[in-house]
Amino acid sequence: MSHPGATRTEQIAPAPQTAASEEQLLLLLALSPDALLVVNQAGEILLSNALAEQLFGYSAQHLRGQPVERLVPERFRATHAGHRAQYFAATRVRPMGSGLDLYGVRSDGSEFPLEISLSPLATGEGVVIVAAIRDISERKRVLPVSMHSSIFPGRSVATGPPRRSDGSAGWEPAAPPPVSAVDRDR
């Protein structure tokens, strides 16, 4: 597997191709807390774990051999192959689409917001990508409410504006939040 400093595929040590190493990879897929897909340079899904199958609504047999673009909304499919080619030209561990809203599409055609982290893995058959996928629907649903709360302290989306000290309805600015150190290593 790659280490965080690896930025080129040549820096990734190939994994030994034995039945034991394949068994270990399958065990890691099964034990992961995230939905995982293993995809080759052509965009073909090689492996998936049960969480990915549940998330997208496909069986492992149905996913295997399919283009990963099948899981990408139609409006993004045309550009996805180019992005994949760019990534394979300079693989490294990184989030996919940093700063963008990413979406997946389920077998029933419904879309959902997601986060994807990409990790290259050198194998005897070439570099493959392990994509860790998280459904962030709940975070997206809750985020506007929490953002509203931080922008309008004391005001609930459900109850309306707070009362001022004189009893009239209205917003009074809150004190600014304390300044704290930012972890720049994230």
Image (spheres, rainbow, N blue to C red):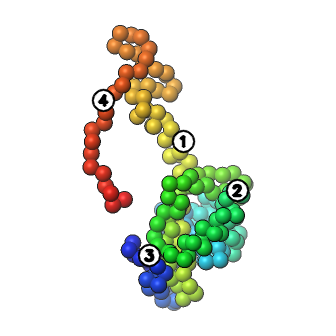
Quadrant where the C terminus is found in the figure: bottom left
Quadrant in the picture for residue 166: top left
Percent of width and height locating residue 42: 65, 77
Up-down: is 42 above or below 162?
A: below
Q: How much space separates mark 3 and mark 4, taking CA atoms?
A: 44 Å
Distance from disc 4 to disc 1, alpha carbons, whole Å, reads 27 Å
Mark 2 sits on what residue? 75
Q: Does the CB distance between marks 4 and 2 fall below 8 Å?
A: no
- What is the C-alpha distance between the residues marked 1 and 3? 35 Å
Q: Which residue position holds label 1?
A: 141
Name above or below for residue 148 compared with residue 42: above
Q: Nearer the viewer, mark 1 or mark 2?
A: 2
Q: Which residue is mark 4?
A: 175
* Image location (x, y in percent) of residue 129: 54, 74
Badge 1 marks a residue whose secondary structure is helix
Closer to the chain start, of discs 2 and 3, is 3
Q: Residue at x 50, y 46 (%)?
A: 139
Does label 1 or label 3 sit earlier along the sequence?
Answer: 3
Q: Position of residue 93 (x, y in %)?
A: 45, 70
Of the pair 100 and 70, the residue shown nearer to us: 100
